Image (cartoon, rainbow, N blue to C red):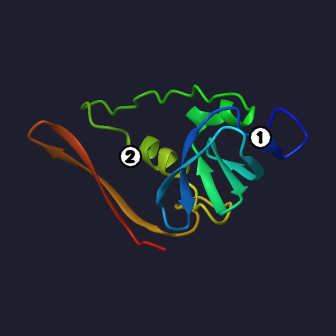
Amino acid sequence: MSSVSKDRILSRDVVVTQIPSGDKHTLFAGAKVFIHQVLGGTYTVQGDAGLYRIDGKDADAIGEKVSTETVQASTLADGAPDPEALWDQLRKVYDPEIPVNIVDLGLVYSLDVIKADSGYKADVAMTLT
């Protein structure tokens, strides 16, 4: 984070995801929030009505640097997506309530790359929390 204080005032309106419901809401400019955690390029903040996730693309609304990370496509010799690269991307998906990614939590059972008519698709078997 760019500064020591975790108390922030939103500089602009921002669409957020309520935790744990996943409902979309708008927090308005001037609202006070407290940053609880920063994981996987997203921010978990406490507002007046509960916990919310702010996407990295909206980090500027809380005075943080906007994430500009790009994912490089990694392929195998036959052009198929590299399964290890896909697993690495899944490890960047965090449970919104605890600081552990969905792979390390054991929520993802399998990931298979399947050739389809128009390219490839990833078939992911996982459980919901």
**Location of residue 48 (image quadrant):** bottom right
- Front position in the image: 66 or 32: 32
Classify mark 2: residues with Cα within 10 Å, few (<14), some (14-19) or many (20+): some
Q: Residue at x 62, y 41 (%)?
A: 41
Left/right of residue 77 with respect to residue 126 in the rendered view: left
Residue 62 horizontal/vertical position (percent)? 72, 37
Asked if 112 appears above or below 28 in the picture, the reply is: below
Quarter of the image with the N terminus is top right
**Location of residue 28 (image quadrant):** top right
- For this orientation, the residue located farthest to the left is 117
Residue 22 horizontal/vertical position (percent)? 48, 61
How many numbered circles are shown? 2
Left/right of residue 20 with respect to residue 64 in the rendered view: left
User: Element at badge 2?
Assistant: helix
Q: Residue at x 48, y 69 (%)?
A: 107
Residue 114 horizontal/vertical position (percent)? 21, 49
Left/right of residue 79 with respect to residue 97 in the rendered view: left
Asked if 105 appears above or below 6 in the picture, the reply is: below
- Residue behind mark 2: 83
Q: Residue at x 24, y 46 (%)?
A: 121
- Residue behind mark 1: 9
User: Element at badge 1?
Assistant: strand
The amino acid marked with disc number 1 is Ile
Q: Are marks 2 and 1 in contact (CB under 8 Å)?
A: no
Classify mark 1: residues with Cα within 10 Å, few (<14), some (14-19) or many (20+): some
The amino acid marked with disc number 2 is Pro
CA distance separating discs 2 and 1: 41 Å
Q: Residue at x 57, y 68 (%)?
A: 105
> Which comes before the other along the chain, label 2 or label 1?
1
Residue 63 horizontal/vertical position (percent)? 75, 32
